[in-house]
């Protein structure tokens, strides 16, 4: 079964220039996919189209076998597909790390008495023991990146979309993220310029250029 299907997508931020013209993409159930491509080729745009932050001008976004069009459709999508933004400042909006990690699961209706364990387990997996009460905006860029990933992991999504997850991380944290991703049972799409990351974590790598996704051999 196809989890995500983008068909003949046209999209542009302005009327003058399209980022995509006739883009097609499929993520099958259980697939782990990497996308590389030059700056500005549309990697981030593609992920944002999947979760409905952006809507295509033309074409079809089909997710979990249903064509998605309006906000109600995409609300349901975002409960099952978690996006980790390229810039953690777009993801983190609470005062403390614990509040940010708790936000998603609480929104999904997880009982309050489970939340403490979810926060603790998520931070432990990220090597951020004791970070619960840290003030989010005072974290280093790398720590913010890890917490941003934590806010999505804590929701246990069926599919993860990771937009350049290793940017700004030092080697130790980069390796940690690679290990975490390798341990995920969920399906995922990673966009990155970090070829080593993609080789270690994905089965198929595509190069995105001029609205075309070509499989590249590793
Ligand atoms: N909000 C916006 N308004 C106008 N143009 C935008 C906006 N966001 C992105 N773009 C443009 O759309 C194109 C695709 O951008 P996108 O961020 O998806 O590329 P990318 O492949 O993720 O790039 P990078 O590797 O640099 O992160 C670029 O030309 C970019 O300048």
Image (cartoon, rainbow, N blue to C red):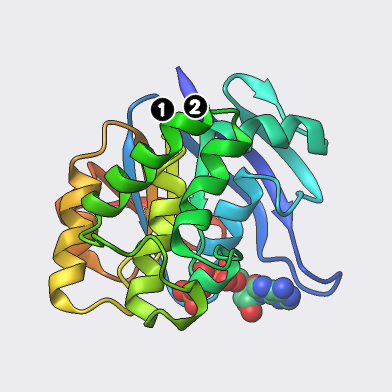
Residue 184 at x, y percent in the picture: 26, 38
Is residue 143 shown above or below 175?
A: below
- Depth order, front residue of 45/120: 120
Q: Which residue is mark 2?
A: 3
Q: Position of residue 107 (x, y in %)?
A: 62, 37
Q: Position of residue 30 (x, y in %)?
A: 33, 27
Count of marks, rendered view? 2
Quick check: 120 above or below 99?
A: above
Residue 22 % position (x, y): 65, 49
Do the residues under discs 2 and 1 have CB atoms within 8 angstroms?
yes
Residue 106, compared with residue 191, is above or below; it is above
Q: Quadrant of ligand 1?
A: bottom right
Is disc 1 surrounded by few (<14), some (14 to 19) or many (20+) residues within 10 Å?
A: some
Query: What label sits on residue 28 in the rendered view?
Result: 1
Residue drawn at the location 76% of the way across and 49% of the way down: 56
Report how far apart the C-alphas of labels 2 and 1 lie in the structure.
Answer: 5 Å
Q: Secondary structure at mark 1?
A: strand
């Amino acid at each position: 079964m196809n989890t995500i299907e983008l068909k003949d997508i046209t999209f542009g931020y302005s009327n003058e220039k399209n980022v995509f013209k006739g883009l097609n993409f499929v993520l099958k159930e259980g697939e782990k996919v990497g996308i590389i491509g030059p700056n500005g080729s549309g990697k981030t745009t593609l992920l944002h189209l999947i979760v409905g932050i952006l809507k295509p001008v033309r074409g079809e976004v089909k997710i979990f076998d249903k064509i998605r069009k309006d906000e109600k459709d995409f609300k349901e999508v975002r409960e099952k597909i978690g996006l980790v933004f390229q810039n953690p400042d777009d993801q983190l909006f609470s005062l403390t790390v614990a509040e940010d990690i708790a936000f998603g699961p609480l929104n999904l209706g997880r009982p309050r008495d489970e939340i403490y364990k979810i926060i603790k387990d998520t931070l432990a997996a990220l090597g951020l023991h004791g970070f619960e009460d840290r003030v989010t905006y005072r974290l280093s860029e790398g720590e913010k990146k890890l917490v941003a990933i934590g806010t999505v992991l804590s929701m246990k999504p069926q599919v993860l979309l990771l937009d350049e997850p290793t940017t700004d991380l030092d080697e130790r944290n980069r390796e940690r993220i690679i290990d975490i991703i390798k341990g995920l049972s969920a399906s995922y799409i990673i966009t990155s310029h970090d070829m080593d990351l993609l080789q270690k974590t994905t089965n198929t790598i595509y190069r995105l250029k001029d609205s075309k996704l070509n499989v590249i051999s590793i």
